[in-house]
Image (cartoon, rainbow, N blue to C red):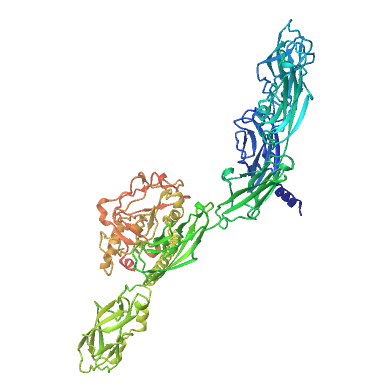
Amino acid sequence: MSPLRLLAAACLLALSRCKTVRYRTDEEGAPGTVIGTLADEMPVKAPGEMSFRLMRQFSNSSLVRVREEDGQLSIGEAGLDRERLCGQAPQCVLAFDVVSCWRERYRLVHVELEVRDINDNAPRFPHAQMALEVSESAAPGTRLPLEVAVDEDVGSNSIQSFQVSLNSHFGVEAQTRADGARCADLVLLQELDRERQPSYTLELVAKDGGSPARSGTATVHVRVLDANDNSPTFAQSSVTVELPEDAPPGSLLLDLDAADPDEGPNGEVVYAFSSQVPPEARRLFRLDPRSGHLTLEAAVDYERTRTYELDVRAQDRGASPRAATCTVIVRLTDVNDNAPRISISALRGAPSAAGVAYVSEAAASESFVALVSATDRDSGANGQVRCSLRGHDHFALQRAYEDSYMIVTTAALDRERIPEYNLTVVAEDLGSPPFKTIRQYTVRVSDENDNAPLFAKPLYEVAVPENNPPGAYITTVVARDPDLGHNGKVTYRLLETQVMGAPISTYVSVDPATGAIYALRTFNYEILKQLDLRIQATDGGSPQLSSSTVVKVRMVDQNDNPPIIIHPVLTNGTVEIGVSSKTSRDSLVAQIKARDADDGANAELTFAFLEESQQDLFTINPSTGDIVLRGDLSEELGQLFKVILTVTDNGRPPLATTATVNFLVTATAPSSIQDIAKPSSWEGKALQWDIPLIVIIVLAGSCTLLLVAIITIATTCNRRKKGNNIKSNTALKDQIDISHLEKGHQEEGSQRGNMFEQGFAATPSYSKEPAPPVAIWKGHSFNTISGREAEKFSGKDSGKGDSDFNDSDSDISGDALKKDLITHMQNGLWACTAECKILGHSDRCWSPSCGRANPHPSPHPSAPLSTFCKSTSLPRDPLRRDNFYQAQLPKTVGLQSVYEKVLHRDFDRTITLLSPPRPARLPDLQEIGVPLFPAPSTRYLGPQTETTEKA
């Protein structure tokens, strides 16, 4: 075995035994004075995990307090007074028991607190004045007993010495009595002469041995009597008597006899107790004053006082009485006259007198339950006690210390099996004959939450008719918990699941207190045939324990759906079936198909014709719905026969559907008639299709096609933009780079904003195009296109709304629109922004904000520019609003729809817009430069007709 396991075993062994701890403290300490800490005495130093509790048997908890966290002992509110606790006992020990708990293991700690005496009491005499008489003929050395002084302190703090005031005739001498008390005698030092001094007054002082010493005083009055020749004398000055403690009252202890040789009154002797005999002894013993018989007046107890010292004074009755003293010591002998006493103190539970203790059912083996103390007031073998425990083997008795025992558990406890144990504690002494004491004791097992609720059945199956009203009762589930109180209080709840896309709590509800299940909606067997519920039962313990069960709610079909005729298709409850006039008898002319949404017998259908119908020509199979011709139709061509068809189910009550069947006699071949009458395989399959599934498939296909179209258009536009930019850069170096600006606007607009800086420069135009280039505003920049390229615009209406010009759809040749296009191009071209591609075009298209000049100078000479602030729009001619028309750029320029406005001006130069090196923010643009062109002297006529037609 490893050293670690040996150490753990030693610790457990130490924990299962009782430990005795001794402390010392002085009496009269201030409340709250710390005596010691029990945690420091434990073998396992774990203050944070230990707790201490004072046992109930120590009823006067105001003397000593125990702190629960670490077992610190301190003086209680009442304080510790040794004289009040222990009286004149030479040693005062306060014993009590403390239970320590560490990791659910209880340990008994026996504490012995010795209360040490301090010199807090001064000696005192019973009477402040004492009177003594002495004969003048008394010889020196005669002793006169004095009253016994009392000091409640013990040991060195008790009376140690006596003193008498200075005089020439008397002295004082201290001595120790048989019971340990200190007393004093007044001793005659020299002869007395009554005639010279008849009395003496002395001051007697009793002093203890404390530091500082305390003292008490009394005044002694001594009266000198006239001489008497002889004094009484005892045969022995001290006599010892042994008395059994069970001696009955009236028993004779001793016959005292004092002799006085005088005659008459001087020889008559009277007996009495001296003043030093305490009142308790005077109550227990009786002295006959005439005979001197010492008898037992009351019962004595060895366990209370074992020795009595009696001073008997014999005195004659002369004029000057003389006395003698005899000391009688009575020693009691012990007999087995006390039965053992049993005291049981529980760790927790009712007071000791109730005889009930509580122990948790979760307590481990050898857990402490109660402390049993067996005492016997007898001494020796008569006071030795042995104890035993009877009743159940789940509990045992272990010796704690001296005559104290512990009741501990020997096995695991289960309150649900045995909630209470009746034990018997037997205590027997070793006397002869022995005395035995029997005490009944009850141990009740306190409940712990160690049992989860248990359902009566692991699976509940219940049938509920459909079409139930909301709130209908379904069933009740019951779970039992054998625990007590909150540990056994069961609450029910429904565990959430999804049923047909909805929480199950929308279908049923559970009463948390009773477990009753109620429906929250009307059930339809045709939609929901079974509902599986999981009910959880939880107790109220800490931690909570729970269990669950499954409730299968099966819907019972009701006949709530009438039959439906599905073939042939009815029109307003009527169907027409063509029958060939050449059809032979017993031929199948039609087949009726019907269905019923119910189940079982409620869905079993019966086909029939009403009695008033034409049953002589046509009959129907009640089970299959096959209509068979029974008559001859060769002479009935063109006739219409009407029958009433009923389809009935077998429910209770039955439901029926009625339809009118018109048989039209035709001249077609019988096979065609039969083919028409019988449902095709395709129709049968169509009826079985799932309509929601078809809708989903159609929608999914549409979305897929739309997505493919969007991707295709976006890819085509991007490819054509790139091709157009390459063409523009190589063919027209004076053309503004639109694609670069649009690309920067698309890629960096979200991060830096739709802003840039623009620079304008005018350069001479050397174009060889048949028409001069046209400047347009497109998006956020100017661009130039040739007149020939402008001819490529289509004049077809976009369909975005009403236009202010004629639609080219009405003109097949398109010549009028082309002519109008050329006319407008002579006046210049004006373009709207990119938003028009989404929102549509109008004659109020907004213009972009103005920009500032390009910081990169152009190598060409600058043209005069007009500037305007960013809050204004580019100038428009309000009188020429009718010149706006809608056009579509060809696919080579990106499928863009723009508004164009042709200004009636000619150009001798073009405007070049250079792409900025980086985008700029639109709010930073303050101005934009626009070229100022001189008014042309001639008008632009446009390209040739052939070129236009080619476009």
- How many marks do you count on the picture? 0
947 or 844: nearer the viewer: 844
Q: What is the residue that sits farthest to the top in this orientation?
A: 196
Q: Quadrant of the N terminus?
A: bottom right
**Residue 500 found in image quarter:** bottom left
Q: Is residue 735 left or right of residue 190?
A: left
**Image quadrant in which you'd find residue 653:** bottom left
Could you say which is closer to the camera, residue 906 or residue 316? 316
Nearer to us in this view, 604 or 739: 604
What x and y, as percent, mark residue 186? 74, 16
Query: In the displayed structure, would residue 241 be above or below residue 845?
Result: above
Left-right relation of 428 to 237 = left
Q: Position of residue 255 (x, y in %)?
A: 74, 28
| Quarter occupied by residue 647 | bottom left
Residue 617 position in % (x across, y down) = 24, 90
Q: Position of residue 600 (x, y in %)?
A: 37, 77
Going by the image, does 674 lie left or right of 917? left
Residue 175 is left or right of residue 615, and the answer is: right
